Structure formats: structure tokens, C-alpha cells
């Protein structure tokens, strides 16, 4: 079943098209990597899907519903979550409260807390390896812990589709391995994943499919090895010039 | 919920000790200060300012800084004052109606300033005070303009069964009325802070983009907090006008009533429940008993001095520095 369908999507900032005429679909249960060099439009695409900015052209259908005009909280309520490239914790709230916000507001507002809310928050913190930090203020976590907190908070909203923006950027090889395990565990929970991975240290290992962007346009799509062999992708990453192509 | 989890504060003994000691002191103050009406008067006013600072911080919990709460204070004061004069309604009725007028004005502020944040919101509210002030000053037929309101009824008689307490003519009874009201505001503030609504407001204050992304309808909860904050501020204004029994536009719409709640909240601790009230109950009496006799003209420089020191050395406020969590 198609969970996300993007049709003719474009975003113009001033004179510049950050994204142009983009079409693709995500199937339920997939893990799809979004790759491309700096400035390719990866985060712009996430901001469009999550409602943070509005598209100039085209539309975004989530589970059949056009979400391109909805507000971020409405999109979240439909079951579409995201994390941020640089994590955005609530610094003066505890780690548990951070996750609780996602739990309490992710689907609809409940004025009265449910008794199992905190328990669910703790479980999710165990999943991301922060079980021992529930009472710590989020602002005092390390950057890598804050990223995992971001993930736990997004999972607490019970998403069907989760957009992960650079979960493993800057991680050590060991931390990347943990991140891979974590992403696979999230997939086992039945969440469809769309993963931005500029440095390709995550998506080659977890993705069913890659989508490659360069300068706001889709240059390749398909199985990871094929996409990585694709001439346009290599050119985008390595900066191959046109005259080199005939060599 | 998270409140069942024990928290570690910096000074666990003082966290409870200070508020409880202070509450007991306040309850017994009229017996201690029997001889001095002045002491009671100062603490009555300090309690009223505490309620104002607490009401201001209900909006502050959501991350918005208002520099224009005198608008709600003044509208509440004038609404209650006028209704108690012309239709001669009982202040028991007109005081909450004053609060409703404050909330009504907040609807306009909320709609106009919906997209504003940070300094832009603060400056817009600062300018907004001029609208109700100028209207009150110039609508002579309704408000008596710059002549002001005089001879207002004092706080009303309270009849409980066989008892009859003339609150208006007793300094101690007035004091207890304001104390009760301030405790109600503390209670409401704490209830809000610990509810999911309070969690939403704090999340919006800490990281608005992330709050929206995890489903928090930030605009709606901020609007609700503005309505509640303005209602309580209008109620405080209404109580104030029946305490003093006269007013002019320049008094209740003055910068004083906009600035003082901000100063008390900042000094006491914006990220705490009790901090703003504690600062009011310490700073206002210190100002009146110590600085006013020394410097009759410029005694309020105390507030500026304390604010600068707190912002530089204790950005979380005094109460915020004493305890690490709200």
C-alpha cells in the first residue's frame, strides 16, 4: 500500500528552486534512504512533508489524504512524525517529560493524563538507550543522547511514517552500528522510515531503496547498489565535471 | 505522571520550608502587626502584586513576555469600578466581571498578535496598553475621562451565616480577602503548570518548532493561557480599585502595573510556580519599609538594581536558583 505520494512537488525560495518537480512514493513498511550532497534539498523536502513550510507547486498525499496545506501538529496527528537535523529537545524539561509531550499530544489532546503515559515514555527511552536518564534535564544530555531523545519523542507520537533527518551524522563507527540496530528495531515496530543520510553511513545498511537528489531534482531512485553506481549520483558527490565523462 | 516522580532540588529542606513558613507568617501577620495598619496595608498590596506576577507568569509559561499587562489590569479596574457606581452592583459581582473584561480584551490582543513572538510580541503588548488607556481617558460620558472615579464602594460585606464581616472597613479583613485571592491564583497556577496544558505551554516555550512537530497545537494553548492570565489580571485590577476606592486612567494603566509583574517574575524565577509570588512578597515590603524612607523620590531603583543582578548572576531567578526544578 502506498503510504506517501509526492506529486510535482516544488519549493521556491526567492529566485531559487530548492526543490523542483519531484515525484516519488513510499510503500508501507519500507525503509527508504534520501541521499544527496549539501544543498540538494533533502531537509527542504522533510520540512515540506512535515508541514513546516508550504510547497510552491505540487502536492503531498499521506495515506491518500492531501496534507500539503496542513499545519505541523495536524500532520503529526495523522501519524507522520519527524526528527531534526540538529536535535531540538525541550532543554528545561526532564528526559521523561520530553517524551511525554509526544505521547500526550501526538494523536490528540488529553487534559487528564493516562496512567500508562509515563510508563510508555520510559519504555521508549529504554528502546533508545536512555532508560537511566529519565529524570535528567534534556538540556544536559550529550548531542548524541539528544538525537536519541528526539527519536524517542517522535516515536511516542505513534507515527506510521517517520522522517529521520541525519540520525547518525557525526557518530563514531560504534555509535553508527548502534544507530543501525536502533533503526532496524523501529522498523520492526511497523513504522515506515524515510531516512536522510548525507554521509551514507546508515542508509546503505538499512534501506530497501534509495532516492538521490541533486540541486533540488531527483537524479536516481532504486536499489542501493544501483543508485550508488549511478553516474549522476557519483557526479553529485564527487563533483565530476562533464568533460571527464568521456574518459 | 511526572509529578509522582521524586525530584532532587538544590536545597530540598528549603524548597518546602520557605513557602510553608511564609504562608504561616502571612496567615498570622494581622495578629503580629495589630498595632500597625501601615504594615498590613503594605502586605495587602504586596499580595495583590504577587497575584499579578503569578497571573503574568501563566502567559510566561508558554514563553511569551508581555510588557502590557496594565491593559488588562486597568480594564478590570474600570469595568468593576463603573459597574459598582452606576448600576450600583455589588463588588462581589463586579470584581469577576472585571476579570471577564480583561479576558475580553485579551481576545483582541490574542487575535492581533497571533503571529508575534519574543521581542515583537513584547513590544506590541507595550504599545497596546495605549488603546484602552486613551479610550478610557477620552470617553468622558462613560468613564468620566481624566477626572477618574471617586467614591467607589469598598470591598463588600461578607455574610456567612450569623457572621457579618465588613471587609471594606477593616484592614485585617481586606488583607485576608487579598490573601485568599492570591492563594486561589497560586492554586490555579500550580494546577495549570502540572496539567498536560502546562506541559504543552512549557514545551512551546522551550522549543516551539519541535512542540508543533510532536502534535502540540501551540497557538491554541498560548491563546488559552493568555485568556486565563488576562482574566486573573483583570480580577486583580478590580480588587485593587475597590481597595483604593478611587482611580484615574494614568494610575491603573500605568507602566508600573506592566513592569512590576515582569520584574517579580524575572527576579523570583519565571520557570517556577511560586517564584514570582515570593519575589513580590520580599521585594515590595523591602522597597516600602527600607528604600522608600531613604529615597522617597527614587526608591523604585531597587527593582532595577535587583533585576540587573538577578539577570546577570541568577538567570533562573532567586527561587529558580534555590531549587532546580519547578
Image (cartoon, coloured by chain):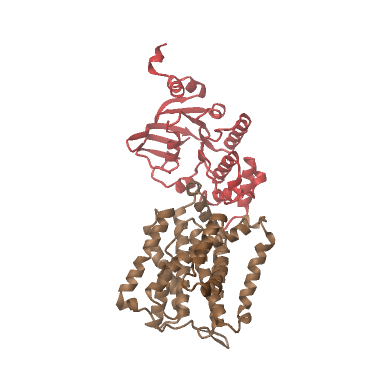
Foreground of the two, A28 or B237 = B237
- The chain painted brown is B
Q: Residue furthest top?
A: A247
Q: Image point 61% across, 56% down: which residue? A: B325
Q: Is residue B320 above or below residue B96?
A: above
* Residue nearest the observer in this picture, A194 or B92: B92
User: Is residue B1 something that shows in the picture?
Assistant: no
On-image quarter of the C terminus of chain B = bottom right
Name the spot of residue A5 as percent of width and height, x first. 42, 35
Q: Assign the N terminus of chain B to one quadrant of the image.
A: bottom right
Q: Residue furthest right?
A: B13
Q: Which chain is red?
A: A
Indicate the position of residue B319 as horizontal and vertical percent values: 60, 61
Q: Is residue B40 above or below residue B130?
A: below
Q: Is residue B320 visible?
A: yes
Compared across the picture, whether B212 is left or right of A126 comes to: left
Q: Quadrant of residue A61?
A: top left
Left/right of residue B42 with respect to residue B251 in the rendered view? right
Counting from the top left corner in percent of width and height, residue B323 is at: 63, 58
Extreme residue in the front direction: B294
Residue drawn at (37%, 40%) of the image: A55
Residue B84 placement (x, y as % from top left): 41, 81
Amino acid at each position: 500500500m502506498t503510504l506517501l505520494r509526492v506529486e510535482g512537488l516544488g519549493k521556491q525560495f526567492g529566485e531559487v528552486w530548492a526543490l523542483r518537480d519531484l515525484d516519488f512514493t513510499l510503500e508501507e513498511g519500507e525503509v527508504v534512504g534520501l541521499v544527496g550532497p549539501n544543498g540538494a534539498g533533502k531537509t527542504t523536502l522533510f520540512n515540506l512533508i512535515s508541514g513546516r513550510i508550504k510547497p510552491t507547486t505540487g502536492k503531498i498525499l499521506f495515506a491518500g489524504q492531501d496534507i500539503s496545506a496542513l499545519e505541523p501538529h495536524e500532520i503529526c496527528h495523522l501519524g507522520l512524525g519527524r526528527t531534526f537535523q540538529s536535535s531540538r529537545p525541550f532543554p528545561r524539561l526532564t528526559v521523561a517529560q520530553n517524551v511525554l509531550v509526544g505521547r500526550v499530544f501526538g494523536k490528540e489532546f488529553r487534559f487528564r493524563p493516562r496512567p500508562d503515559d509515563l510508563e510508555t515514555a520510559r519504555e521508549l527511552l529504554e528502546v533508545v538507550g536512555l532508560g537511566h536518564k529519565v529524570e535528567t534535564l534534556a538540556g544536559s544530555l550529550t548531542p548524541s543522547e539528544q538525537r536519541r531523545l528526539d527519536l524517542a519523542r517522535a516515536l511516542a507520537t505513534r507515527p506510521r511514517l517517520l522522517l529521520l533527518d541525519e540520525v547518525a551524522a557525526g557518530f563514531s563507527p560504534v555509535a553508527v552500528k548502534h544507530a543501525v540496530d536502533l533503526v532496524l528495531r523501529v522498523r520492526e515496530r511497523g513504522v515506515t522510515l524515510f531516512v536522510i543520510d548525507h554521509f551514507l553511513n546508515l542508509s546503505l545498511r538499512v534501506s530497501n531503496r534509495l532516492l538521490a537528489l541533486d540541486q533540488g531534482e531527483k537524479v536516481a531512485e532504486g536499489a542501493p547498489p544501483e543508485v550508488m553506481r549511478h553516474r549522476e549520483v557519483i557526479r553529485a558527490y564527487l563533483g565530476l565535471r562533464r568533460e571527464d565523462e568521456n574518459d | 505522571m511526572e509529578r509522582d516522580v521524586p525530584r532532587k532540588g538544590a536545597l530540598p529542606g528549603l524548597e518546602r520550608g520557605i513557602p510553608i513558613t511564609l504562608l504561616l507568617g502571612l496567615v498570622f501577620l494581622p495578629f503580629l502587626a495589630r498595632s500597625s495598619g501601615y504594615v498590613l496595608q503594605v502586605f495587602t498590596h504586596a499580595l495583590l502584586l504577587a497575584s499579578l506576577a503569578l497571573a503574568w507568569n501563566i502567559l510566561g509559561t508558554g514563553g511569551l513576555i508581555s510588557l502590557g499587562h496594565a491593559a488588562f489590569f486597568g480594564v478590570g479596574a474600570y469595568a468593576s469600578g463603573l459597574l459598582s457606581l452606576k448600576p450600583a452592583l455589588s463588588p462581589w459581582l463586579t470584581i469577576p466581571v472585571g476579570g471577564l473584561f480583561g479576558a475580553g480584551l485579551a481576545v483582541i490582543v490574542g487575535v492581533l498578535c497571533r503571529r508575534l513572538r519574543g521581542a515583537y510580541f513584547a513590544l506590541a503588548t507595550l504599545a497596546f496598553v495605549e488603546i484602552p488607556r486613551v479610550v478610557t481617558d477620552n470617553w468622558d460620558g462613560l468613564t468620566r475621562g481624566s477626572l477618574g472615579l471617586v467614591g467607589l464602594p469598598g470591598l463588600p460585606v461578607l455574610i456567612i451565616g450569623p457572621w457579618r464581616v465588613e471587609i471594606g472597613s477593616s484592614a485585617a479583613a481586606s488583607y485576608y480577602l487579598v490573601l485568599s485571592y492570591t492563594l486561589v491564583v497560586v492554586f490555579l497556577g500550580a494546577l495549570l503548570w502540572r496539567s498536560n496544558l502546562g506541559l504543552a505551554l512549557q514545551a512551546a516555550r522551550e522549543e516551539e518548532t519541535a512542540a508543533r512537530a510532536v502534535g502540540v497545537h501551540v497557538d491554541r494553548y498560548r491563546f488559552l493561557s493568555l485568556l486565563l492570565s488576562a482574566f486573573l489580571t483583570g480580577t486583580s485590577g478590580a480588587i485593587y480599585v475597590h481597595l483604593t476606592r478611587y482611580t484615574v486612567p494614568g494610575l491603573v494603566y500605568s507602566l508600573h502595573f506592566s513592569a512590576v509583574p515582569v520584574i517579580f517574575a524575572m527576579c523570583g524565577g519565571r520557570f517556577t510556580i511560586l517564584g514570582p509570588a515570593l519575589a513580590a512578597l520580599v521585594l515590595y515590603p523591602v522597597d516600602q519599609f527600607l528604600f522608600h524612607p531613604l529615597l522617597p523620590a527614587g526608591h523604585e531603583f531597587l527593582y532595577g538594581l535587583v533585576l540587573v543582578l538577578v539577570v546577570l548572576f541568577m538567570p533562573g531567578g532567586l527561587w529558580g536558583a534555590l531549587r532546580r526544578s519547578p
